């Protein structure tokens, strides 16, 4: 279920951020503790995945500045590096996909 935008959730809600960063695309999902999707984005990287990540994350963090992001999980070919730079949790893509499907 998609509850797009911060106007659909109470201020102060704790959020979880998932990022799939690859050479072709950047996929971001923001969910609450009930696993409701608050925001999801799909962007092309145009060969510069880390530049695009910076742009998208800056906009997302500004938009949700009244909320606390409590977890950061990353996957994709760039996920390991980003996890090392941010302190986020890296998850192998196959594990991430199978875990997600098991929760459906």
Image (cartoon, helix red, strand yellow):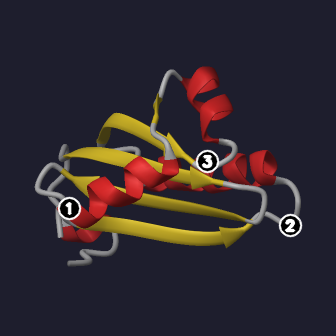
Residue located beneath label 1 in the image: 102
Residue located beneath label 2 in the image: 46
Residue located beneath label 3 in the image: 58
x, y percentage for residue 36? 19, 65
Query: Taking 94 as reference, is 15 left or right?
Result: left
Kindly report the distance in space between the C-alpha atoms of the residues bearing marks 2 and 3: 18 Å
Q: Residues within 10 Å of mark 1 (few under 14, many from 20)?
A: few
Q: Nearer the viewer, residue 1 or 68?
A: 1
Q: Residues within 10 Å of mark 3 (few under 14, many from 20)?
A: few
| SS at circle 1 | helix
**Res 23 → quadrant:** bottom right
Query: Taking 27 as reference, is 78 left or right?
Result: right
**Front tag of 2 and 3:** 2
Kindly report the distance in space between the C-alpha atoms of the residues bearing marks 3 and 1: 31 Å
x, y percentage for residue 41? 52, 69
Q: Residue furthest right?
A: 47
Answer above or below: position of 75 versus 72: below
Kindly report the distance in space between the C-alpha atoms of the residues bearing marks 1 and 2: 32 Å
x, y percentage for residue 40? 43, 69
Q: For the point 36% across and 57% down, which residue is it?
A: 30
**Res 98 → quadrant:** bottom left
Q: Nearer the viewer, residue 51 or 49?
A: 49
**Looking at the image, do the residues carrying marks 3 and 1 touch, with CB atoms under 8 Å apart?**
no
């Amino acid at each position: 279920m998609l509850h797009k935008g911060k106007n659909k959730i109470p201020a102060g809600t704790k959020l979880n951020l998932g990022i799939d960063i690859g050479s072709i695309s950047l996929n971001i999902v923001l969910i609450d503790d009930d696993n409701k999707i608050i925001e999801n984005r799909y962007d092309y990287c145009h060969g510069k995945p880390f530049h695009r990540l910076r742009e998208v994350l800056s906009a997302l963090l500004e938009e949700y500045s009244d909320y606390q992001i409590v977890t950061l999980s990353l996957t994709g070919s760039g996920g390991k590096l980003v996890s090392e730079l941010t302190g986020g949790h890296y998850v192998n893509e196959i594990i991430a996909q199978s875990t997600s499907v098991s929760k459906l």
